[in-house]
Image (tube, grey):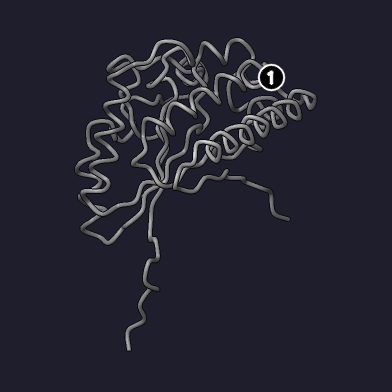
Amino acid sequence: MAKRLPEGFIYGGATAAYQAEGAIHTDGKGPVAWDRFLEENYWYTAEPASDFYHMYPLDLELCEKFGINGIRISIAWSRIFPQGYGRINPKGVAFYHRLFAECFRRHVEPFVTLHHFDTPEALHSAGDFLNRKTIDYFVDYAKFCFEEFREVNYWTTFNEIGPIGDGQYLCGKFPPGIHYDLSKVFQSHHNMMVAHARAVLAYKAGGFDGEIGVVHALPAK
């Protein structure tokens, strides 16, 4: 007798905006620190990646065809707020509405991350999450997304807070490429967790119907 997954089981895949969308200079998207860092340190760039920005209808059609009924995706902060705060980019907002609508049309539940390694360059160059002002800007961005994209039922604030700080300030493989500055590692981790907590409180205070959490990546021994 063939075994079946339980009713309501989510069988999904995962992407991230900067790792999949491409279109890094398209429709008003603002820069992120990775743009220059990749050009200066690696043999590849984020353009076009898998061109999810243009190819998402086909990708979601394939999800439906092969029984994938959930997808973890992220919003590019700088596609909504090119500088990280202030002016809103309507073309970016419209893109994510189209993306989520196609998800639901294809019976694929979107699990949406707000920050997947891609702080807007204007904030990154001002200290990223070492600068406590970035906490406020992140919470404002999160509140905007919660209100604007009410069709989303599942939210994640940050993807892998630990590896972000480690990559930026311990092993130097993330921009700004600093090595072995433990004070920056711990302060970055702390401030991102404060930003996460404040975003969760804002979500609960807003009375939204969905669920919200954070993704951690912890080393195993």
Q: Residue at x 52, y 20 (%)?
A: 41
Q: Where is residue 4 in the image (x, y as percent from the top left)?
A: 35, 77
Q: Position of residue 46 (x, y in %)?
A: 39, 26
Most extreme residue toward the right, as rendered?
Answer: 183
Q: Where is residue 7 in the image (x, y as percent from the top left)?
A: 37, 71
The relative height of residue 111 versus residue 202 in the rendered view (above or below) is: below
**In this rendering, position of residue 139 left or right of residue 127:** left
Secondary structure of the residue carrying numbered label 1: helix
Residue 139, image quadrant = top right
Q: How crowded is mark 1: few (under 14 residues within 10 Å), some or many (20 or more)?
A: many
Q: Residue at x 26, y 48 (%)?
A: 104
Residue 76, image quadrant = top left
Give the tally of numbered discs. Answer: 1
**In this rendering, position of residue 148 left or right of residue 185:** left
Q: What residue type is labelled 1?
A: Leu
Most extreme residue toward the bottom, as rendered?
Answer: 1
Residue that label 1 marks: 130
Q: Position of residue 60 (x, y in %)?
A: 24, 47
